[in-house]
Amino acid sequence: MKKKFPLVSVLINNYNKDKFCVKAINSVLQQSYKNIEIIFYDDCSTDYSLNKIKKLRNKKIKIIENKLRKKIRAFNQMEGIFNSLKKSKGEIVCILDSDDFFSKNKIKKVVDFFINNKKSDILFDKPIIYNSNDDKYKSHIEFKSRKYKWPIFPPTSCISIRSHSLQKNKRKIFIKKFDEVWFDFRIATYYSLNKKQFNLIDDYLTFYRSYPSSHDKRYKKLFNSLWWKRRDQAFNFILYLNKKKYKKNILTLDFLFTKLVNKFFFIF
């Protein structure tokens, strides 16, 4: 990067999160790193989200109001991110869900990483998780890349990426198939398998709210058809990305059992 203090665009997707969205935005405005802009994408909220954000009247905030919400939530999220990307001017993009928030020094550490690692396009950090009782704890998951399978990766709000790289690869990531495969899975898997990039800051820089919604509860494991459908689509997404690496999964127990369950036990 040529600039000493590159502009960072924080893309915030929001749908009916009026209890949290102001905290999310304030966590960005209060960063120790100051060269930032916020693109706040509201996806047809029916609560007070937009009113609260408009009252902030901060020049660093650009608001996009989507007027037509589609039925597939995963596609809504990706359309929000890529529509926000079009309006952004930053060299670096940080993704933030409107119910999460950043630690004060997150963006500075993200910028330092990209300045010092010019060949790296994507970066993850670790989450501090809030549960439904507002108890918080550091995630002890071992986030890592796996050679022929999707990586074990942190949630959406822990993703930062060079803007030009996301622009260049967005068509590959956002194909309108695999309706249960979300943005974080797609981008982590694409960069891990196709670009051989999985960069992780060993620091807890993002506060992530793990409040299961009515939609999330439908993914109860083992005997839930949607959970198995998502796993099947995950393998099919790898096939779409990289046929050679997909073939490495074919003889694994995980792959075979997923295909067997989807074929004989559940009807979609």
Image (cartoon, rainbow, N blue to C red):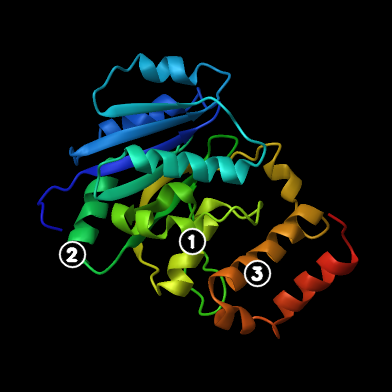
- Left or right position of 251 against 47: right
Mark 1 vs mark 2: which is more N-terminal? Answer: 2
In the rendered image, which residue does mark 2 sit on?
A: 116
Tell me residue 104's x, y (percent).
Answer: 27, 40
Q: Residue 248 carries which label?
A: none
Identify the secondary structure beneath mark 1.
Answer: helix
Q: Is 246 placed above or below 225 here?
A: below
Mark 2 vs mark 3: which is more N-terminal? Answer: 2
Check disc 3: other Cα within 10 Å, few if <14, some if 14-19, many if 20+. some
Pointer 1 and pointer 2: residues touching (CB < 8 Å)? no
In the rendered image, which residue does mark 3 sit on?
A: 235
Q: Residue at x 60, y 31 (%)?
A: 69
Res 136 visible: no
Given residues 196 and 75, the one toward you in this image is 75
As measured in the structure, the alpha-carbon distance from the residue carrying label 1 to the one carrying label 2 is: 27 Å
Q: Which residue is drawn at 71% across and 65% down?
A: 232
Given residues 135 and 16, the one toward you in this image is 16
Circle nearer the viewer, 2 or 3: 3
Q: Residue 172 carries which label?
A: 1
Identify the secondary structure beneath mark 2.
Answer: helix
Given residues 150 and 72, the one toward you in this image is 72
Q: What residue type is labelled 1?
A: Lys
As measured in the structure, the alpha-carbon distance from the residue carrying label 2 to the one carrying label 3 is: 34 Å
The image quadrant of residue 148 is bottom right
Q: Which residue is drawn at 49% across and 48% down?
A: 137
Q: Residue at x 55, y 25 (%)?
A: 44
Q: What residue type is labelled 3?
A: Phe
Tell me residue 2's x, y (percent).
Answer: 10, 56
Count of marks placed on residues: 3
Circle nearer the viewer, 1 or 2: 1
Q: What residue type is labelled 2?
A: Asn
